[in-house]
Amino acid sequence: MFVSTLIVAISTVKMATTMAAGEERAASEVLRAIARHLNCLNEDSKTTRKRALEAIKRETIDKGLSSGVLQEVFTCLLKSLLKCLSDPMERCRETAIHMLGDFIRCVPQPEDSLPYLMPALTQRLGGKEILEPAEELRLSMVEVLTLTVEVCGRHLAPYLDDMMKILQRTIVDPFPDVKRESCKCTVHFAKSVPEHFHMQAESLVKPLMQTVSHQHSRVRVSTIEATGAVIQYGTGKNVDDVLSHLAQRLFDDSPQVRKAVTVVVGDWLLHLRDRYSYFHKLIPLLLSSLSDDIPEISQRAAELWRQTGALWEQENEDDLKDKMDFLLTPPDLYPAGVARPGLGCRELVVRNLSNLLPALARDVVDWVAGTRVKTAQLLYALLLHAEDHCTQHLQLLLSTLYRACNDPESDVVTNCLRSAKLLGTFVSPEVFLKLLLVHLKTPSSSSSSPHTPLMVLAAVLGGCSRELLKPHLQKIADTLVQPDVCQEYQQAVYLDQLLSCVDALLSVCEKDCCSVSLQLLQVLVTVQSLSTEPQLTDKAEQSVVSLCKVQGLATVADLYRQHMDQLLQWLSASQKTWTSYSPQRLQLQVIATQSGPVIGEFLPLLMPLLQNCLDPERDPEMRLHIFTMLSKLLLDATHTLDSQGRFCEHLDVFLLELLLPNLVWKAGRTAAAIRTSALCCLLALLQGGAIPPSQLLAVEERLSPQVLSALEEDSQLSRLLACRSLSTLLKLIGPSLRPDALNNIYPGTILVSPSVYPVFVRANMSFSPLLPTVCLSFILSPSLSLFLSQSSLIPSVTDTHLFSTSF
């Protein structure tokens, strides 16, 4: 056996010796063939040198010689080819560069050329001024350098200085392709000599950061990849120097650039030597990519993040033993369709949350909109990982959300509200309500955005569970109904968020809201009373309907019937302080209008309230608004104030204590406007059918003088209303009037006819003896248009539109 092995070995040696001898002979023949061409490389003629190089190429590279022969030939040609790199003729330099690349690619021992090759390349590319003027040739040289790194590998360690000099210059080369190839070369070199690369890796950081914002996206991608390798195989001290630049690239318009950042950061989290020290700086960058618009990027980020968490979990298995068993079940109301992060990922975020949130709170109000959007998306991702651990940071989180929810960018607000909803899912209501409800009374945001605490509260309530929220319903409702909360601000955006809080309670708690139905209705009434936008009013009305549904009530009237007693007492408590600007006056209007027939069931409570508000000494503008409201109600009295047929029981009070005192003449335009509104209310009372003729007859003696005196008002509208009131009065009780009452009306009409007549007759008509008859006929006529069409006494009529007004 030994003898046979020895024979094989001897045969192999003889064969190798024979082959080596053959290659030496072949190499000698090639060298003899190109000897004359080598001499021509020293000629002054450019053409001669060019032809010589081309001939050498044909005799060597193009002939397909064996690698052993090429190695011998390359050794002899190397110095001559390197000398040609500085040839004045560009074509000669180009041919020499390409030949060098071909030889390095084909020879079995390219590292033998390094002692001559590297100084030559350093001279051409690594000086303060790059000697090679042609950008395409600079690209070819860098490509040769990259090839050299690939084939020589660790043999380049002694030439670390030369490599760094070259790369520092070529990374910032004006030619974009040279930049890209230099970055590629950097990556290969870092991987080839990791034991030595870290010593000078820092010198490449500055040129890379100068190039990372290049206008070409492919250059930016290459630069980011090179930066990843430089930091990965460097000392790790320059992470802070590059993070801000990489963070900016997350906003890059090019998906490939954003993907490159994602991959680099993910690799650092997995392989960086000192990655534990930089978790709080690297995690935000990778988590930001989870919300990228491009699915490929977000999926890649998710996979890298999963691997990071799994690796950390594996490395810290002993610390997580107690948590692995009881942290597997997701919390109740966990967002639907969202995969729960692994335990390692969650723990990584929890342990770094205190370092992440302060920076996030600053960036969420950054002046750049893109930064604010990314930060809001990141906040959601962090809270999704932190789960109930965000409780200890709740104060900072809420203040951050308050500021962010006032952002003009809708994407920022949307993501912040998603984050707020997560707080409702993960944090106990007892905890978050202690902070949130206080902020409602004293908004922590600026006075220009008091709505943001309400906005956050609505979102938080939307994420909470019904069972946990039920014990706190009373506290929430009592806070919302406080005047400082629901009546302090009248901006539409504030009222809208107040409405959102009510809607959130109705949506989450449903039937449990029966216990706070009164408070919620008071809030909804307030929103409707203060709103100046129809859309918001309609939305509030829909919320009232929802409040009915959760209680099983058929109509809105049933809801008001359930709470009308408390509502009127609620308003009466502050009636003495009402003015025209008081929200209570508007609340009364909403309640009286929306309750429909229910208001007629509570006249004993309503009348004292009206009596106090319509006192002649109270605010004139407030009285005017209330008279206007009463006019609308009295026109449809059978479905409002007289729905139970009981209004007659309060008629004496209404006429003698509410209306007539406001018809007493006083000087001034304000007093005149009050009398006009009172006349309008009187006409609505007479025409609405709420007053029986018998009762009207009983008060006619006190009523008629006030109406007759109104015929002398300066206001045409007041005189018109007085005329229509007399007409309706005579229509209702005319046949029952005493003669003396008729005698008072007729002479009064004659006396004031010059002031009534111009309302509907040309002003320049001369006085006619029939004028009193015409006026009286107008007063008694149920239809002005019929009277005018049948009258032959008036040749023409103007301003008839004044009479077409219906009340």
Image: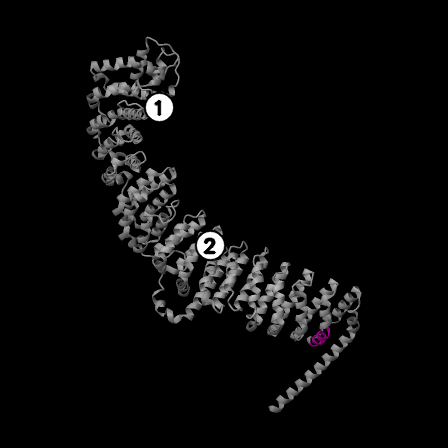
Q: Is residue 69 above or below residue 357?
A: below
| Amino acid type shown at disc 2 | Lys
CB under 8 Å between discs 1 and 2 = no
| Amino acid type shown at disc 1 | Thr
In this image, 559 relative to 804: left or right? left
Quadrant in which the N terminus is drawn: bottom right
Any magenta on residue 691? no
Residue at the location (62% across, 63% down)?
A: 169
Q: What stretch is highlighted in magenta?
A: 68-77
Find numbered disc 2 in the image and state the secondary structure of the residue it sits on: helix
Any magenta on residue 76? yes
Q: Can residue 138 be seen in this view?
A: yes
- How packed is label 1: few (under 14 Cα within 10 Å), some, or many (20 or more)? few
In this figure, which residue is indicated by the disc labeled 2?
374
Residue at the location (53% across, 66% down)?
A: 231
Where residue 496 sits in the image (x, y, percent)? 37, 43
Magenta stretch secondary structure, dominant: helix
In this figure, which residue is indicated by the disc labeled 1?
805
Q: Is residue 731 above or below residue 517?
A: above
Q: Can residue 548 be seen in this view?
A: no
What colouring style does the render use? Answer: one colour
Where residue 514 sits in the image (x, y, percent)? 26, 46
The answer to which of 169 and 711 lies nearer the viewer is 169
What is the quadrant of residue 95 in the picture? bottom right
Work out whether mark 1 precedes mark 2 in sequence or the reverse, and give the earlier one.
2
Q: Nearer the viewer, mark 1 or mark 2?
A: 2
The answer to which of 370 and 196 lies nearer the viewer is 196
In this image, 418 relative to 7: left or right? left
The answer to which of 381 and 544 lies nearer the viewer is 381
Residue at the location (38% across, 60% down)?
A: 386
